[in-house]
Image (cartoon, grey):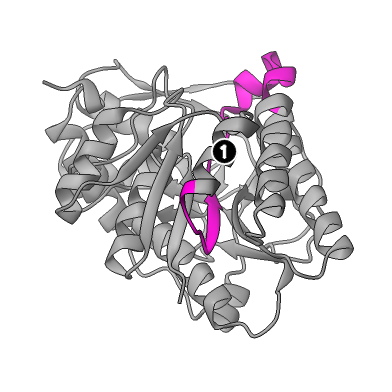
Amino acid sequence: MKNKILVTGGAGYIGTHTCIALHESGYEIVIYDNLSNSSYEAINRVSNLIGQSIEFIEGDIRDAGKLKEIFNLHEFFGVIHFAGLKAVGESVAKPLMYYDNNVSGTITLLAVMAEFGVKNLVFSSSATVYGDPETLPINETSPRSATNPYGQSKLTVEHVLEDLAAADKEWSLITLRYFNPVGAHESGQIGEDPSDIPNNLMPFISQVAVGRRDKLSIFGNDYPTIDGTGVRDYIHVTDLAQGHVAALDHLQQQTHAAGFLPINLGTGRGSSVLELVNAFSKVNKIDIPYQFAARRAGDIASCYASADKAQELLGWQAKLSITNMCEDTWRWQSMNPDGYNTK
């Protein structure tokens, strides 16, 4: 069994946690990352946690020459493709940058994979491809649309993968649509470390808790939800990492190519912003001051997954609770008040 995996964007938040899960499951990993939104320190810490060094190559997925060098050196079973820009607000301000990196970069990667006959891909997609959902919970056949350039870039890549699978029956292209990843490794050594003001709720809460920010702004308290605040399906990053291992294991077991295979990774339960803030306060015994602000453009009221397909096809389901998410986030943030820059 070939078990060497190229992990693009492997130094990032979800990438680092997945690298640990891959190692624990017997996969050999090579990380490829341009460190634009991640840190070399994160790779060091992953190496420490797994007790061995990891091969790391600094490079950009738009660099076909560099990718070919790597594929020449290694015999990969497949690629887990995390490398992508992911801030919704930034995508609205800089759409060309998002389409160039997320779409053009993926096309470059796929072309090199095809050249070397490596046709197994697990793609890091997003629940944003569902836009503003018509019905809940969202399943994989729900209509797709996007409310911002970030989501549109993910959706465009999905269309590319669908067309590729239709044109060449040798491809296995699993697209994992994540809901809202939160939490950190139980060791407190790796976690989410936004390079600027956090775009996501949990790192903002934890930065308020550790004193880096004065208070949390909650965008919108007039949604048609349990308490007026937005409802999301929060999933522990460790569970999410296991979902990638399950996807690769599934491809290893197939006797024929899987084609284009979209799968949701979520808990199947929605929690409101206020519920998450209150849970964090209660679990960690820390008061989180907050204020309400106007809704953000492109935000939707509620979004949570049907995770039935992941369980049926991959034998995967989320195991960790909101309590685990809050405890692990705070352990990471309190041990690393300035993220990976903490001395």
Left or right: 302, with 214 as reference point: right
**Quadrant of the frame with the C terminus:** top left
Picture quadrant of residue 313:
bottom right
Segment colored magenta: 73-98
Measuring from the top left, give residue 28's x and y in whole percent. 36, 60
Note whether 282 is above or below 252 in the view shown: above
**Quadrant of the frame with the N terminus:** bottom left
Q: Is residue 82 magenta?
A: yes
Left or right: 195, with 62 as reference point: left
Measuring from the top left, give residue 73's x and y in whole percent. 47, 48
Picture quadrant of residue 153:
top right
Measuring from the top left, give residue 61's x and y in whole percent. 59, 34
Residue marked by disc 1? 67
User: Element under label 1?
Assistant: helix
Measuring from the top left, give residue 115's x and y in whole percent. 70, 50
Residue occupying the point 28% across, 24% down: 208
Residue occupying the point 73% across, 65% down: 171
Task: Inspect this view and state whether residue 99 appears.
Answer: yes
Note whether 55 is above or below 42 in the view shown: below
Q: Is residue 31 magenta?
A: no
Q: Residues within 10 Å of mark 1 (few under 14, many from 20)?
A: some
